[in-house]
Image (cartoon, rainbow, N blue to C red):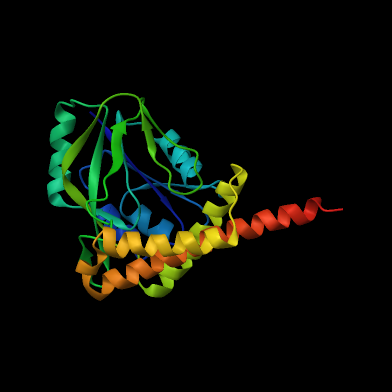
């Protein structure tokens, strides 16, 4: 069974080399870049990847489907630039492809934040469906928080990704801002609305859920920061949704 790996990128020079270096077992690696201004594409080519470019940004789901359309393998592994395949996971993937018993496989992610591997806060095991038969899987069209829709059985692989999502708090804050804008617009397009009490209520509940219900307090000071940042992301998302709704109402006013 031939395996294609797909990665979408933009300005991932800090990550893409280590990501691709962990994929030596793949038959084909495709990097679909959306206008990087750093060395992402050059580094990807140095690691033997086929690099393609797109001039627009349709959102994460549509962009990953574009990358999927470029793949030629029987099976596809979707990986983000800030993720790494561990040797154990690589062995599990190669083993299962010799005699697949499912159409797709979910894989756990172990994420690092400020030097700590986060095992609570809702971050572990963080299963994601990433390995699937090319003719049986497709990404949802969501602009953010996309997922693979599979026709057939989904099983779980042993091993896990190593995930390095935030190099610094500045990167974390920037990502929250960008993702909340995408999420607010997607929710608005679906007709969702909120109120000012709802904005603050969602943020407060998010903190409680991450820090207490998901035992973020066991992740030390990093768990407290993560709960606060999750609440901030919720606040941004819903306040942006509220502003979009108010702006639309104002446009319709006589």
Apparent side of residue 227 relative to residue 25 in the rendered image (left or right): right
Q: Quadrant of the N terminus?
A: top left
Q: Is residue 37 visible?
A: no
- Which residue sits furthest front? 197
Q: Is residue 98 left or right of residue 246?
A: left
Residue 231 vertical position relative to residue 185 in the rendered view, above or below: below
Residue depicted at x 60% and y 50% = 193
Q: Position of residue 115 (x, y in %)?
A: 23, 72
Which residue occupies the extreme right position in the image? 254
Q: Is residue 119 above or below residue 115?
A: above
User: Which residue is found at the position 23% from the left and 54% from the top?
Assistant: 124
Q: Nearer the viewer, residue 12 or 228?
A: 228
Q: Nearer the viewer, residue 236 or 87?
A: 236
Say if 37 sits above or below 76 in the image.
below
| For residue 120, side relative to residue 134 (left or right) | left
Query: Residue 48 location, x and y as percent?
Result: 32, 49
Task: Say whether residue 68 is visible.
Answer: yes
Q: Position of residue 244 (x, y in %)?
A: 65, 56
Q: Using the image, determine if residue 161 lies above or below residue 150.
A: below
Q: Tell me the residue at 26%/38% (across/down).
A: 27
Q: In this orientation, which residue lies closer to the viewer: 19 or 144?
A: 144
| Number of callouts | 0
Image quadrant assignment for residue 29: top left
Give percent across and percent down for residue 246.
Answer: 69, 57
């Amino acid at each position: 069974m031939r395996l294609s790996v797909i990665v979408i990128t933009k300005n991932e020079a800090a990550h893409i080399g280590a990501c691709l270096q962990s994929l030596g077992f793949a038959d084909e690696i495709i990097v679909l870049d959306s206008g990087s201004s750093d060395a992402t594409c050059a580094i990807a080519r140095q690691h033997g990847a086929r690099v393609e470019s797109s001039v627009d940004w349709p959102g994460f789901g549509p962009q990953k489907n574009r990358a999927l359309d470029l793949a030629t393998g029987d099976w596809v592994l979707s990986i983000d630039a800030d993720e790494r395949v561990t040797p154990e996971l690589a062995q599990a993937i190669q083993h299962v492809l010799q005699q697949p018993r499912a159409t797709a496989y979910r894989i756990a992610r172990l994420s690092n934040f400020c030097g700590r591997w986060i095992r609570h806060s809702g971050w572990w095991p963080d299963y994601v469906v990433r390995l699937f038969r090319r003719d049986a899987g497709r990404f949802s069209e969501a602009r953010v928080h996309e997922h693979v829709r599979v026709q057939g059985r989904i099983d779980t692989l042993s091993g896990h990704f190593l995930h390095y999502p935030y190099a610094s708090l500045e990167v974390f804050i920037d990502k929250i801002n960008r993702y909340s804008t995408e999420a607010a617009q997607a929710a608005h397009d679906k007709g969702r609305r909120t109120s000012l009490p709802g904005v603050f209520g969602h943020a407060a509940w998010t903190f409680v859920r991450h820090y207490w219900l998901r035992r973020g307090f066991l992740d030390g000071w990093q768990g407290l920061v993560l709960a606060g940042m999750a609440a901030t992301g919720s606040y941004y998302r819903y306040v942006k949704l509220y502003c979009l709704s108010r702006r639309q109402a104002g446009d319709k006013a006589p």
